[in-house]
Image: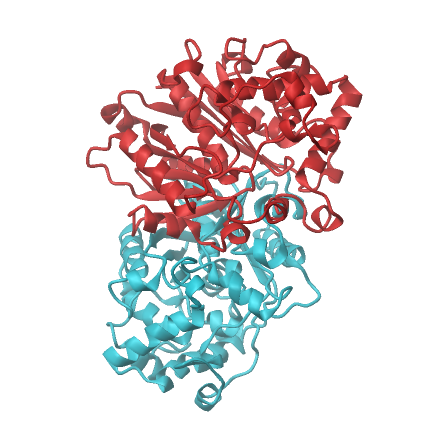
Chain colours: A red, B cyan
């Protein structure tokens, strides 16, 4: 298996981009990533695009070919991959395998979602496709409702409080306010969260990631080649993915995402590292409770201790393990298919020392954690300065 | 790169399966493929599922995780890939890369589509997502209309006749009548086609592949291991994919699919073979004109000579290059995401000598050709008896 490196990254401004469509967003991100890669005659020969629901959202499938077309990359092989909210992470993993196998020598990995072209209820319905249509959606379940069940159970079993969940949102808005690409540019406090409208008790508006338009891209090539043309290549030292039941009611536990635990074990084995070696992580905080479960399931904190750790600032920019320096899904925004790739963009910037106001010190090794649905898919990548 | 082999295949009966849903179909095919593989303790560690439009068709995205769940394969990595009508072929290609790279050791590749749960116009709209939403669908174009343009131009440039196109349908129904999994079990004659209702002139109902429910699966592993556990492994000696503009109006030619030509060139280079070495092929005959273009673009016949060759019987079961022995999309049916995998199932049966009434003599090397949309994606695999 060949070693794989990221040589270029880019993303569009995340937000409600009324004047830009699906194609504009990905071209913006793709152009930036390709420019950043500073290719010198190397030919891009593959494209993997993560996007969750362009069918219901914009009436368009076949997004792989569409993006190759609009990025001017015909006739290269271009494939859409989808794993709900983990579509971007899974696209990164396909790109990794394409380079590792020797099938491709220079691949663009993209993630994109255009969510604001349809009404709110239509977005809810399209996103519902991430869960179990027959056993959840059909019965009226929505994603805030499903995560609210997990939050309630976490509160019951571990004494997690609404204030502690709110501290996740406060931290992530703080980081987002230091990221020019983030949807939300304002800091908030605990009261903002606690006083915001209830969506699905105990989750309030500020516990939820927003509806976002956006795209992110990365350029991958074999490490050996990357070291010749790139000043600061970032090596992907682990790529792991796991699955679980689509419906929440079939799971053994409501307070953990087993797919995260399985994928984390595989990723750490592949990288020959442990949680202690990780300097920072981008984790899947589609809701505040999701970040708390993620940092527990990944092994950064013991089960039941994630909420307190966040409240105590251990996951802040200057904490022992900075989490979601980009602002996460909560602060930076969550254009579903783009999120997994955006996480890799942020880690790349941090490892290169290009994260400006939110730069953490001596970042050598970072981790990305991308979840699909309520945990039926988890994808983890570990990256280090090459 | 490790060598890759198919060790097990299976498919559901193709047709209008009113009493079976998306999940039933894939479980049926998956179970057959896994049983056929006769695994002896080898652990399936990856799943790639090709499905085009489960969002619009059944309200369900995240099909990779869903299938792992319903096939009892949690917590393995499971990913949906999509390239419109080439989704199955692209899934096979991801499975190939996963084994070739060493990331996985035993992978199930599945293709599935459940198309009869919604109305006819809704199917047309969902399938339209394979084309360019902004430049084709929005303007009212449908797939029969788009392929009709290609057919008209082919008739003008090369003198191709409606009778010759009809001969594709006659041949494929003949083959389908010898395949118990096929949607259509009756032979037809030229008059049946010519007298059938016009869909988009010059294409009539019998020039078009049908709306179908169905699934197909294959189990892949490294060739070295396959040779130890499997009596008749089939090696995948080439996997190639190419793209073109999504919209027809941007193409240099209306009478060829350039993505097919590019992918074919790559595939023959990878396999170190030429068209003469191929004993049979399953090609993408979503419309009769599509098969004629395919056998020309793949190099089996010169451009403009495919229609006459078909009329002369050169592509029949006893012809010099049997095409679509399964009945093709036209006769066997076209459950969009399943088609690319079904093609590999048929080639596997033929290379093993298990194709019964439609078995061709001395089949050593076969090719599959799967197209997305009107040609924006083409995927080609070449397989041989290991």
Which image quarter is the N terminus of chain B in?
top left
Whether residue A254 is visible here, answered yes or no, is no
Q: Is residue B314 above or below residue A359?
A: below
Q: Is residue A310 above or below residue B226?
A: above
Whether residue A122 is visible here, answered yes or no, is yes
Find the residue positioned furthest to the right: A156
Residue B318 at what x, y percent from top left? 39, 78
Residue at point 73% right, 35% down?
A: A251
Residue at point 53% right, 17% down?
A: A174
Residue A384 at what x, y percent from top left? 41, 19
Q: Is residue A330 left or right of residue A164?
A: left
Residue at point 55% right, 58% down?
A: B216
Q: Quadrant of residue B156?
A: bottom left
Residue B212 at what x, y percent from top left? 57, 68
Q: Is residue B365 above or below residue A286?
A: below
The foreground one among B173 and B337 is B337
Q: Is residue A374 left or right of residue A322?
A: right
Q: Is residue A362 above or below residue A85?
A: above
Residue at point 23% right, 37% down?
A: A42
Residue B144 at what x, y percent from top left? 44, 72
The foreground one among A95 and A33 is A33
How many labels sit on residues? 0
Q: Quadrant of residue B282?
A: bottom left
Q: Is residue A211 left or right of residue B140?
A: right
The foreground one among A140 and B324 is A140
Find the residue positioned furthest to the left: A41
């Amino acid at each position: 298996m060949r070693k794989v490196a990221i040589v270029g990254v880019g993303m569009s401004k995340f937000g409600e981009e009324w004047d830009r469509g699906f194609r504009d967003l990905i071209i913006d991100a793709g152009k930036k990533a390709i420019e950043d890669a500073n290719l010198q005659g190397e030919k891009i020969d593959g494209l993997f695009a993560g996007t969750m629901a362009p069918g219901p959202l914009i009436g368009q499938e076949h997004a792989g070919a569409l993006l190759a077309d609009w990025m001017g990359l015909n006739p290269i092989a271009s494939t859409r991959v989808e794993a709900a909210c983990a579509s971007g992470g899974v696209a990164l993993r396909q790109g990794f395998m394409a380079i590792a196998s020797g099938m491709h020598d220079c691949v663009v990995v993209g993630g994109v979602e255009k969510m604001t072209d349809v009404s709110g209820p239509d977005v809810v319905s399209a996103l519902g496709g991430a869960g179990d249509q027959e056993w959840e959606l059909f019965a009226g379940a929505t994603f805030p409702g499903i995560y609210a069940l997990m939050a309630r159970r976490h509160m019951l079993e571990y004494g997690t409080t609404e204030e502690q969940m709110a501290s996740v949102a406060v931290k992530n808005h703080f980081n987002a306010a230091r990221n020019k690409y983030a949807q939300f540019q304002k800091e908030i406090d605990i009261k903002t969260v606690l006083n915001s409208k209830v969506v699905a008790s105990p989750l309030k508006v500020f516990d939820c990631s927003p509806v976002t338009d956006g795209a992110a891209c990365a350029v991958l090539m074999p490490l050996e080649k990357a070291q010749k043309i790139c000043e600061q290549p970032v090596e992907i030292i682990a790529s792991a993915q796991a699955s679980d039941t689509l419906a929440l009611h079939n799971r053994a536990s409501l307070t953990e995402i087993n797919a995260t635990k399985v994928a984390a074990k595989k990723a750490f084995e592949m990288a020959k590292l442990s949680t202690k070696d990780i300097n920072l992580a981008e984790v899947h905080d589609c809701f505040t409770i999701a970040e708390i479960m993620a940092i527990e399931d990944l092994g950064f904190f013991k089960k039941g201790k994630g909420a307190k750790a966040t409240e105590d600032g251990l996951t802040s920019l200057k904490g022992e393990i900075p989490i979601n320096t980009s602002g996460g899904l909560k602060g930076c925004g969550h254009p579903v298919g783009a999120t997994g790739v955006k996480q890799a963009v942020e880690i790349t910037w941090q490892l290169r020392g290009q994260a400006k106001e939110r730069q953490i010190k001596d970042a050598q090794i970072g981790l990305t954690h991308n979840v699909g649905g309520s945990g039926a898919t988890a994808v983890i990548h570990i990256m280090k300065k090459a």
